[in-house]
Image (cartoon, rainbow, N blue to C red):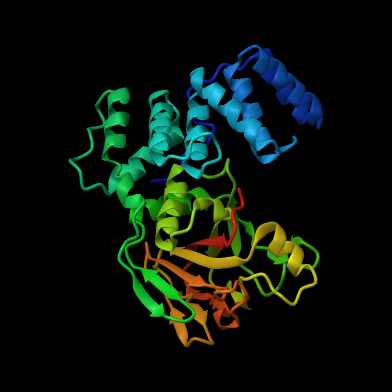
Amino acid sequence: MASQPESHCANPQISADVRRAEQCDAAGAHAEAIQHLVAGTHKHDVEATTRLGKRLLVGDRAPCFPKEAAGLIAEASARGGAEAAAVLAVLYAVGASQRHDVGAALESLTVAAERGWAPARAQLEVLSADSQTPAAPPEAAADAGRWRLLAQRVDLGSWRTAPPATQLSASPLVRSYPKFASEPVCRWLVDKARGRLSRALVYEALSREVMVRPTRTNTAAVFNLLDTDLVCVLAQVRMAACLATPLRHFEAATVLHYAEGEEITEHFDFVDPNLPTYEQEIAERGQREVTFLVYLNDDYEGGETAFPRLGISHKGQCGEGLFFVNALADGSADVRTLHAGRPPTRGEKWIVSQFVRNRPLL
């Protein structure tokens, strides 16, 4: 199922304040745009409140005030906002609001679907597609009833539980989960990333910048709190169950795309202790302790995940999860985890890459 564009909304009312904000943004006057959204918010304008909350959540042409943003989005949802309810579902799921509860997240997503928010409806279709409960209601069912029935089919318990695993290496630990994600979830993640891809960057801790390097030729789509959705977050919830690690330790998820011939050469994912900024990076963000991969397709040749120092060359299957531990028990770097993403020789490869720190990021 294809991802629904965010413009597929429940016909929000566009007020004069929102129109003025749009005009200011078009002219590059972003501070004035924020002032108009604030004015709309003071008038209890749901669309203005939603837009202001979204911008403050990630610092989009505005200061980044996530706590205040969460309050604005909750207010917009309480006043009937469809998109706001969908954004609030993500905040509930990741713990970026007053509640940290995937049950509350699913309920908020259901409300968004009932209010007509197309991306919320599409997510419920995906999440219920592989359910073991009775069949989904027919398309002809009334909208409100259909979305709530679909939500009832979503087994949140299974998302909170680690699936059966196979160990590829005991030290360093490399573990595979052959049945980590269903094909509908994999297709959803691919479709969500498609069209948002840009050249994958390499983080240089010395300069604290990300940049293009010839060692990495693939493309990537990074999902911040506005780019993600409950399907993506539930995949992270399952990763957290596999690792027994809270979501607060997770960086933003990234979907990687490798066209034929594209690769990332041998590298490490841990924070390099030889860099002069190592201690500051560790103090601020912690060690990048684990890398978790989810293979989203397998209809390609080549493209293995290779660990040359471990003698492992692994071509994952669609829906398979795999993690490896980058650090030793004391948090220091484990150089045995040198690895590479080999280039596909035919077809294209899609994969989720999730970095997990050894301290909370939220």
Residue name at image x 75 percent, y 29 percent: 25
Report whether 299 appears left or right of 210. Answer: left
Farthest-out residue, top? 43
Up the image or down, 258 lies above or below 76; here it is below
Report whether 317 appears left or right of 305. Answer: left
Q: Quadrant of residue 149?
A: top left
Farthest-out residue, left? 134
Measuring from the top left, give residue 151's x and y in whole percent: 31, 35
Report whether 184 appears left or right of 327. Answer: left
Give the number of marks. 0
Decide if residue 54 is in sight here.
no
Q: Quadrant of residue 2?
A: top left
Most foreground residue, 345 or 208: 208
Up the image or down, 113 lies above or below 277; here it is above
Most foreground residue, 223 or 92: 92
Report whether 157 appears left or right of 23. Answer: left
Measuring from the top left, give residue 23's x and y in whole percent: 75, 24
Decide if residue 129 is in sight here.
yes
Measuring from the top left, give residue 16's x and y in whole percent: 68, 13
Residue name at image x 45 percent, y 56 percent: 240
Up the image or down, 213 lies above or below 11; here it is below
Most foreground residue, 355 or 131: 355
Measuring from the top left, give residue 290's x and y in whole percent: 53, 67
